[in-house]
């Protein structure tokens, strides 16, 4: 998995975020903060644009933070998804109508967030954030680490796939897992007790498969569903 580098973010008035996944990051850093005063100072550094370019990779974020003329290098670590967690995530996303396309376009519906919660899939594990910094603070994360995490929440708000990349699930891996989920054979045939689905059900299944291919590949299948003969 290749690292992604984001240029320095210009100063902004508010440190707040609104989207579901960005709020997950914001909530995680609020829980990780040792002192509300550190949280406030970190947000201030982030808002004033004191965080340099951010390098983000699976399980790790690195950035330099300026304060009073001194630069401090911050490294934030986050647990990556194991294969079972990544597969569970893909299965939840693949099960919802339109969720695949929405996510790949950078939109996270509230219904997807609720489904992930019901399935026990954590976007950010509780207590999983940790940061090291060159400053003399003994808390983890320090105000500089909180500043970097604040801006990571902004990046996730702009592109939800940033959070998946941080958790070790790259876009290409997600697409491959979604395709694998879609291609799994219908094992429920044994439950039909020898009965075949009627033509209407078969056509509906074909239409759903075609829609998923459009979401995954960004193009229509070479053969229209209406042209398929049974």
Image (tube, grey):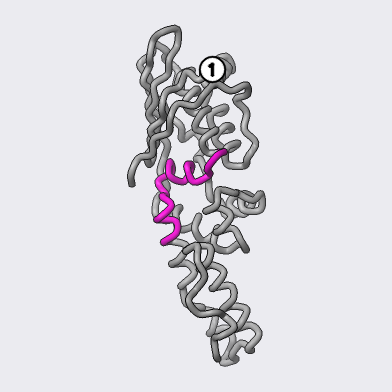
Q: Pointer 1: residues within 10 angstroms few (<14), some, or many (20+)?
A: some
* Residue 52 in view (yes/no): yes
Residue drawn at the location 66% of the way across and 49% of the way down: 110
Q: Position of residue 214 (x, y in %)?
A: 53, 66
Quadrant housing the C terminus: bottom right
The residue shown at (51%, 17%) is 45
Magenta stretch, overall SS = helix
Q: How many marks?
A: 1
Seen in the picture, residue 134 relative to 198 is either above or below; the reply is above
Q: State the image quarter where residue 12 is shown.
A: top right
In this rendering, position of residue 124 left or right of residue 111: left
Q: Which residue appears at 50% of the width and 20% of the height?
A: 49
Above or below for 101 versus 167? below
In this orientation, does residue 35 appear? no
Asked where in the image residue 28 lies, by quadrant, the reply is top right
Q: Which residue is mark 1?
A: 48
- Where in the figure is residue 52, as x and y percent of width and height? 42, 23
């Amino acid at each position: 998995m290749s690292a992604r580098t984001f240029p320095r973010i210009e100063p902004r008035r508010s440190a707040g975020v609104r989207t579901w996944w960005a709020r997950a990051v914001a909530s995680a850093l609020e829980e990780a903060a040792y002192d509300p005063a550190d949280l406030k100072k970190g947000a201030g550094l982030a808002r004033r644009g004191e965080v340099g370019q951010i390098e983000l990779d699976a399980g790790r974020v690195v950035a330099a933070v300026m304060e009073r003329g001194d630069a401090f290098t911050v490294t934030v670590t986050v647990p990556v998804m194991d294969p079972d967690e990544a597969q569970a995530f893909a299965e939840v996303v693949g099960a919802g109508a339109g969720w695949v396309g929405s996510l790949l376009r950078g939109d996270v519906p509230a219904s997807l967030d609720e489904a992930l919660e019901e399935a026990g899939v954590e976007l950010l594990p509780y207590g999983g954030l940790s940061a090291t910094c060159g400053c003399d603070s003994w808390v983890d994360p320090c105000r500089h680490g909180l500043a970097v995490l604040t801006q990571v929440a902004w990046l996730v708000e702009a592109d939800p796939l940033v959070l998946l990349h941080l958790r070790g699930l790259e876009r290409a891996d997600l697409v491959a897992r979604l395709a694998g989920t879609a291609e799994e054979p219908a094992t429920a045939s044994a439950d039909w007790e020898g009965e075949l689905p009627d033509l209407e059900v078969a056509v509906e299944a074909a239409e759903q498969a075609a829609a998923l291919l459009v979401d995954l590949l960004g193009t229509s299948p070479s053969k229209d569903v209406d042209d398929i003969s049974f």
